[in-house]
Structures are given as C-alpha cells and as structure tokens.
Amino acid sequence: MTQQHSSVSNSEGRAPKGVVLADLTWLQAEKLFDENTVVVIPIGAEAKEHGPHLLLKNDLLIAEYFAGRLVAESEIVLAPTLNYNYYPAFTEYPGSTTLRLETARDLMVDICTSLARHGPRRFYALNTGVSTNRALEPAVEILACQGIHLGFTDLRSFEKLEQGVGEQEGGTHADEIETSMMLIIAPWSVDMSKAVCDYNPRPGGGLTRFEDRPGSYSPSGVFGDATLASVEKGEVVVEAYVGQLLKDVEAVRTAVLPG
C-alpha cells in the first residue's frame, strides 16, 4: 500500500502505514482496492450510557482511538465508524439507543458488499461492544456465502489482557478497566469526581435502573467500580489491546477466503 492519504501518525511521528477511506477520492480508492486489501470498519456507540462520569459517546471515542492506532501501524484501509448498533442492554437509560438486531446485521453486510464490488474481500469490524457480536456473527455467515471474509473484535476474548490489572470485585461496563482506558484515550471526557462503585450482579438481562426489574440493578449505569481507575492501569490495558487488535488484523489478512 504505497499511497498515504491520512493525517494519522504513529507515536514516533512516522507516516501511517494505512489510509483513511474518507480522505481519498474514488480514483485513489480504486487504486488501493484488490482482493488482499484489509478494510477495517470501527463500531462505536455515540449514544450509549456509561454512568455519571463518562460520556454517551464513550464507545465512539474508544473505536476511533484504536482505529487511529491501526492506521498508524498496519496497512489497512479505514472505513468510517458506525456510531449506531445493537445495544439492547442499556435502553432504560436516557440517551441510549439501539438498532434492531436485523438492522445491525444488515448494516454490516451492506457496507461490506458495497465495498467488495470493487475488489476487497477481507474486512475487520473493530468492535467495541459485546451485544454487537449477536449481529456480527450472522453477518459473517452471510458474507462468507459471497466469498467475503469478515473478522471482528470479540471483547470476551480480550478479558485475559486485563488479568492482574484490575482490583474490583467484578464488572464490565464503565468500570475500573474501561474508565482507566479512558484516562489514556480521552482524559478530558472523564469526570472522576462522579465515578462510583455500582456492582450488583443478578440474572435476567442487562442493566436496569429499577430494583424490582430483572437484570443487574444499577441506578448509576456503572457495572463495576469506576473509583479504582488509574492512568497506570489504563496504559497497560490500552497497549495490550492495540497489540491484540494488530494480531486480529493480520489474521484477517492471511485468512483463507471462503469459497
């Protein structure tokens, strides 16, 4: 990938290895697209609750940060970020949005098939959610029938990268780990004076603001202990995530295309 059309640079100030699709003309895109091009599509909610101390666009900030790191360090074409997706677990909290499962699935399928018309057959969804897996998994199957390979970030497999870092009893959302990451990714977006410990695991669905409803009771929208967050923890986890994301992208690059 010889052309460079991105304002992103890596930590050493070198020119990025990848390109940002939105910064190209269609003529430039045409020259970059072939069967071996790896197209990365970030997914990050811009309207999803993250407790009293993090912004609704928290996942968007995460997705675009990691997308920038991938552009800097990997030969990819970075597609625009998807800022809506399937997030049914948070809809009791004002401002949170979700697409229907079928809509989220078809959104990814349609984007990949549109770009694949011009050559690319390798796609990676830089996924910052967990419920989004339920839309991505059938999208993988649908695209495979068209000879298109779609890989995606499975955050459940990233949990091992956090081992030995956190101190909280448990948690997975707007918690110690995610808040620590945000202190690295976008410290201006974090208000630690409003961080809380709110961890009440219960079966029966996602988070709920109401104690008498099924699900994990969380009046704050936090699931874990955000008060334990620190820059030091965030730096360890963020760099571990970048390393794993780069491995994921290379796995897509070398995968056997579906027949």
Image (spheres, rainbow, N blue to C red):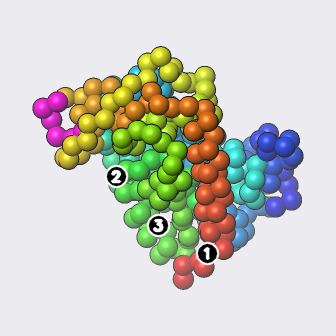
Q: Earlier in the sequence, mark 3 or mark 2?
A: 2
Residue pictured at 26% horizontal, 36% vertical:
200
Give residue 255's mark: 1
Vertical arrangement, residue 108 with respect to residue 202, above or below:
below
Tell me if mark 1 has few (under 14), some (14-19) or many (20+) residues whose alpha carbon lies within 10 angstroms of its own: few
Estimate the spatial distance between the alpha carbons at disc 3 and disc 1, rounded to whole Å.
13 Å
Q: Amino acid at mark 1?
A: Ala
User: Quadrant location of the N terminus?
Assistant: bottom right
**Magenta-colored segment: predominant secondary structure:** loop
Tell me if mark 2 has few (under 14), some (14-19) or many (20+) residues whose alpha carbon lies within 10 angstroms of its own: some
Residue assigned mark 2? 101
User: Quadrant location of the C terminus?
Assistant: bottom right
Residue pictured at 45% horizontal, 47% vertical:
129
Q: Secondary structure at mark 1?
A: loop
Q: Secondary structure at mark 2?
A: helix
Q: Is residue 160 left or right of residue 38?
A: left
Give the extent of the magenta segment. Answer: 211-216
Q: Tell me whether circle 3 and circle 2 mark residues in contact (CB < 8 Å).
A: no
Q: Tell me whether circle 1 and circle 2 mark residues in contact (CB < 8 Å).
A: no
Nearest the camera: 149 or 167? 167
